[in-house]
Amino acid sequence: MRVLIAEDDPVLADGLTRSLRGAEYAVDCVASGDQADHILISQNYDLVILDLGLPKLDGYEVLKRLRRRGAKVPVLVLTARDALDDRVRGLDLGADDYLTKPFDLPELEARARALIRRGQAGGSSILEHGPLALDVSGRRATLNGSPLDLSARELGVLEVLMMRSGRVVNKDQLAGQLYGWEEEVGPNAIEVYIHRLRRKLESAGVTIRTIRGLGYLLERP
């Protein structure tokens, strides 16, 4: 899952980035509202963590423009403003949740998981594909009811494929969900994860097909 953090406090931004990457999210970070607005025009995210007090373009305006473009991405607003009017304004402009500074990182991570689950899985934390089940929130997969031993990257690839079951997913889409801007992607990394997943799933009849020149397809059961 891919997250954009728009926060101009470098210490807080670094802490959020480290925390979410440690929870196996791909994280990008910007420090101004105009950067956030520009990136959100061209890039897709599963969650935006948005500070209201951004320079050059405040968070309210970023949020207003985002929703005006019809984007449905969940937005978690972070702010030092705890007045009721500020919270109401943010929610009325399209924020999905609101967290006042200072806050505890475990609470932010829990809210992030809930928003991503709501946005990507229709409110359910469980994705199912025949004998395969993935708990998006708990980051666990099972095959025929038994735990499936997957690395964090393998789990990330599987999650994207299950979200788009029956549709072709290309390498760039997979890499974009697994890695942030600053993380290097090896030339064969995606192929390696796909190969490992196939070995672990083939015994149960779960098939990941390679569509030459296009990408990968998790066939419908």
Image (cartoon, rainbow, N blue to C red):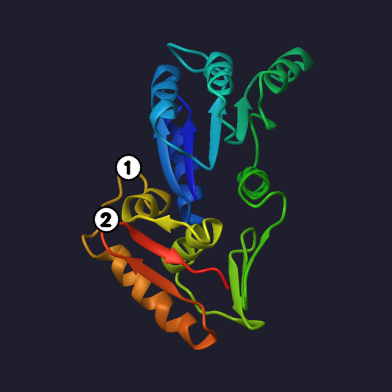
Q: Position of residue 95 (x, y in %)?
A: 66, 27
Q: Position of residue 42 (x, y in %)?
A: 39, 30
Q: For numbered disc 2, what is the local secondary structure?
A: loop
Q: Which residue is mark 2?
A: 185
The image shows a total of numbered marks equal to 2
Residue for point 32% across, 63% down: 190
- Disc 1 and disc 2: Cα gap in Å? 10 Å
Q: Under tag 1, what secondary structure?
A: loop
The C terminus sits in image quarter: bottom right
The residue shown at (47%, 61%) is 156
55 or 90: nearer the viewer: 90
User: Which quadrant of the view contains residue 79?
Assistant: top right
Percent x, y of residue 197: 42, 75
Name of the residue lying farthest toward the left: 187
Vertical placement of residue 203 versus 124, above or below: below
Mark drawn on residue 209 = none
Q: Nearer the viewer, residue 85 or 185?
A: 185
The amino acid on which the numbered mark 2 sits, given as a three-letter code, is Val
Question: Please, is residue 186 above or below residue 113 in the view?
Answer: below
- Residue 35 sits in quarter: top left
Report crowding for label 2: few under 14, some 14 to 19, many 20 or more residues within 10 A (C-alpha): some
Residue 182 vs 144, above or below: the answer is: above
Place residue 163 in its image quadrant. bottom right
Q: Residues within 10 Å of mark 1 (few under 14, many from 20)?
A: few
Q: Residue at x 43, y 64 (%)?
A: 217
Whole-percent x and y of residue 177? Answer: 42, 50
Outermost residue toward the right in this view = 84
- Residue linked to disc 1: 181
Residue at screen point 72% across, 19% down = 92
Outermost residue, bottom side: 203
Q: Is residue 13 left or right of residue 213?
A: right
Please state which amino acid type lies under the numbered disc 1.
Answer: Trp
